Amino acid sequence: MTKLTHLDDQGRVSMVDVSRKAVTSRRALAEGYVRMTKDTLASLHAGENPKGSVEITAELAGIMGAKRTADLIPLCHPLPLSKVKVRIISDPDLPGLRVTSETKTEGVTGVEMEALTAVSVACLTIYDMLKAVDKAMVIGGIRLLEKDGGKSGAWRADY
Amino acid sequence: MTKLTHLDDQGRVSMVDVSRKAVTSRRALAEGYVRMTKDTLASLHAGENPKGSVEITAELAGIMGAKRTADLIPLCHPLPLSKVKVRIISDPDLPGLRVTSETKTEGVTGVEMEALTAVSVACLTIYDMLKAVDKAMVIGGIRLLEKDGGKSGAWRADY
Amino acid sequence: MTKLTHLDDQGRVSMVDVSRKAVTSRRALAEGYVRMTKDTLASLHAGENPKGSVEITAELAGIMGAKRTADLIPLCHPLPLSKVKVRIISDPDLPGLRVTSETKTEGVTGVEMEALTAVSVACLTIYDMLKAVDKAMVIGGIRLLEKDGGKSGAWRADY
Amino acid sequence: MTKLTHLDDQGRVSMVDVSRKAVTSRRALAEGYVRMTKDTLASLHAGENPKGSVEITAELAGIMGAKRTADLIPLCHPLPLSKVKVRIISDPDLPGLRVTSETKTEGVTGVEMEALTAVSVACLTIYDMLKAVDKAMVIGGIRLLEKDGGKSGAWRADY
Amino acid sequence: MTKLTHLDDQGRVSMVDVSRKAVTSRRALAEGYVRMTKDTLASLHAGENPKGSVEITAELAGIMGAKRTADLIPLCHPLPLSKVKVRIISDPDLPGLRVTSETKTEGVTGVEMEALTAVSVACLTIYDMLKAVDKAMVIGGIRLLEKDGGKSGAWRADY
Amino acid sequence: MTKLTHLDDQGRVSMVDVSRKAVTSRRALAEGYVRMTKDTLASLHAGENPKGSVEITAELAGIMGAKRTADLIPLCHPLPLSKVKVRIISDPDLPGLRVTSETKTEGVTGVEMEALTAVSVACLTIYDMLKAVDKAMVIGGIRLLEKDGGKSGAWRADY
């Protein structure tokens, strides 16, 4: 049976020892969305958001959020991120905005948490910028899509 | 029509001017969840998590995350939080863990973003502590439930 | 003679005591620039920067930098910022980009340092985004333009 | 033609992928100044600043600021700094204080932004400590002097 | 019997609700020390530390540390500090350095944790700067000396 | 005679140059305590702290504090921590709580400061959670126990 890695037998919590793990190229891909009304989404395509500033702001917030992952998640190891990319696209069928992030490192632990944090912070930023229009938006579907590198190797979500 | 408050006509972004807004008691309530397999949830009730350390860790991470909101969300005003409470309960029907947060301030802007950030960081922490067992967990349903105080007054989500 | 407010007679350093100062509306306006070659500036108007993303990114960095002022400047008091606005315009005569910032608070100390920090971080961000094209850019002219509120009242730079 | 490295064809912003860049010894040297009146500069040499505490405080702020570079500059990669040195000297001909910084890393990206951030934060700290005496000080001349290491190799400013 | 204020009956942790507490002038005084050998202390009075830079550096670190209290201590409320003063004196009888700090706020919670954090970070900084000479130094005696303001009023340590 | 590594002949302060130091496995062990009355310690074993939440909270705060070491200690190099473990046990003879921490890195500088910072922040968190019961608690005995790795090799405290 797989163990909860951060807990000992008495339920005491630790940051996992990764000092003997090998440095490998690691990569993660994550996604999430902000679901909103059609009207709210439409306001993003109207004159109010001429340069896509909402999307650019949220993408930047996601990138900066990824760099703060070890500050936010108590047991995460600090990581030298070698790439963070966040992209937001409009999906009229949701309706809402879809967020994806890709993170990379050359390191001893994976970058899944960094990718998921990037998506979460981007979604929160979208909510913040649209909340005067619509407070009922829902953030969801935040999950890992792909993971490469490390001892456990590649992992893919069931699409 | 409601305007996007952070953008001007050219799509340039600013932190909204709240210097003339009155200081009032403000409160927000938010929720979210981490959906996982029955087996993963079961591992939390087994001997591996005897003190509920996963939940306590995630609740603390949510509280500390709420205090970092203005660092993470580019256009959020810094706020003197007067209360942050995060609670996590197990829901076998989800299956998974449900997170709620309550935030309060005596200030000029609302604490919705702080409540939503607390939930998001708590969910990410749960994912981090269980990801060795289950990488397919999904974070979702992050939304505002209640908001009180301020010029726009009370708001309730449709339950 | 005016005294250096942070030092005592032995040259020991302290954060100034502002506990008896009145809460008033305070505002500051600051400016600065990044001087570059005509070619570098031209690259910003070409197809490479179609949405003005360089300017939007630097404006956001300036806003977020203003919120970090008390973290960066050792003797600055933490302040509840009620407004931060950063604007960047192209000046072909410089040649380069000009940055202005406006900050506001309802508080006991001024927001001059927040305005100057916003300008500085925005200039550094511009440098970062253009440094692959031009490493010889110079950041300069960072100064306070206007200050309002507080015991010492209004102050204006000689234009 | 040199490309803006952080932007794609649609003007969307990313942190550059450095996962395939080699780890090399990198170094940067930067400078800047705070220009002030002769009287303000004189106050630094009088009994008010007996231990040079203004300079020591600003040098420390610059060192600590260099460590915060990736927090402040949205698209900067986090770097393991192996050296930061900031020095401030008095220049009666300016008149004012001149700041230089040297930064080093063993890493995959350069330390130019860290050197420039160190200078900027040191200049802001000088302004903060002298602003009760002189609000008209100007921060300027912030530029890269030297850069070594990395694929593009050595670079020197025209002195 | 006095209750543990951050815990509920099930041992779940929260930030205490202070939304109904009155804003009053609050002040705290704390102390601590770094005990070292006579030789280590002597090295501070010799030519190696001509300007008292070790003490100035540690005093600044204490001030900046006080401003980070709510980031470090999970259940601390963020506070608008109105004064932080840290002083370090040499005590040949210890032998070592003694640290005191004074903090003030106009707020709804006390500044005891800020004063104790200032002392702790100053002591750690002293250790860091002297550890090449002496690794056996001991940090101790960190305690609250005085507390004023708030509902519970003044408190004094038994000297 | 051993030199103060962070100071030059004029007493100016720098972060030490570690660019030529070898990457080795490094480890540090530190300890400290919070001394309190028997009654205060007893309250931790009574119904008020059923899950040991005070200890779990302080252990997490210590782990997160270790990750902030380079932010807090001015001349510390940022380090990729590969392990942080903090443990708190009750000692009726003190009376009080004893804190130990273990830190590891694969890097060019030691992790002593990270271990000592973890202990300090854990002690401060214990104080914070018990201060409503007992303000006279004393934090002390913070010292390095063991150090391994690096050029200077192993070091052990005299027990």
Image (cartoon, coloured by chain):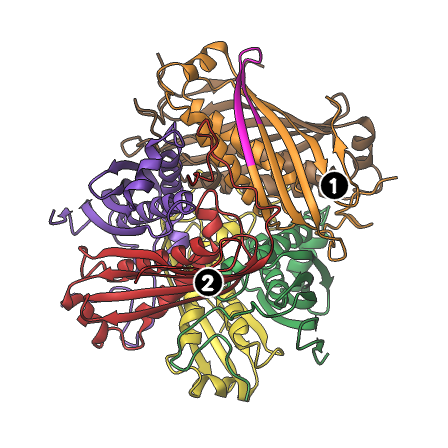
Chain colours: A green, B yellow, C brown, D orange, E purple, F red
Outermost residue to the front: F1
Looking at the picture, does residue F116 appear above or below residue C150? below
Q: Is residue B111 visible?
A: no
- Residue position for label 1: C52
Quadrant in which the C terminus of chain F appears? bottom left
Callout in the foreground (2, 1): 2
Q: Nearer the viewer, residue D55 or F142?
A: F142
User: For the point 29% across and 71% down, which residue is it?
Assistant: F89
Whether the residues at callouts 2 and 1 have beta carbons within 8 Å, the answer is no
Element type at mark 1: loop
- Residue position for label 2: F103
Q: Chain of mark 2?
A: F
Element type at mark 2: strand
The residues tagged by marks 2 and 1 sit, at their Cα atoms, a distance apart of 45 Å
On the image, the x and y values in percent for residue B112 come to 47, 58
Q: Main secondary structure of the magenta part?
A: strand
Looking at the picture, does residue C113 appear above or below residue F32? above
Confirm whether the magenta stretch covers residue E50.
no
Amino acid beneath label 2:
Thr
The span picked out in magenta is D85-99
Amino acid beneath label 1:
Gly
In the picture, residue F55 is in which quadrant? bottom left
User: For the point 48% across and 39% down, which residue is it?
Assistant: C72
Looking at the picture, does residue E59 appear above or below residue D11? above
On the image, the x and y values in percent for residue D58 come to 48, 30
Q: Nearer the viewer, residue C68 or F116?
A: F116
* Left or right: residue A88 compared with residue C62: right
Looking at the picture, does residue A134 appear above or below residue C158? below
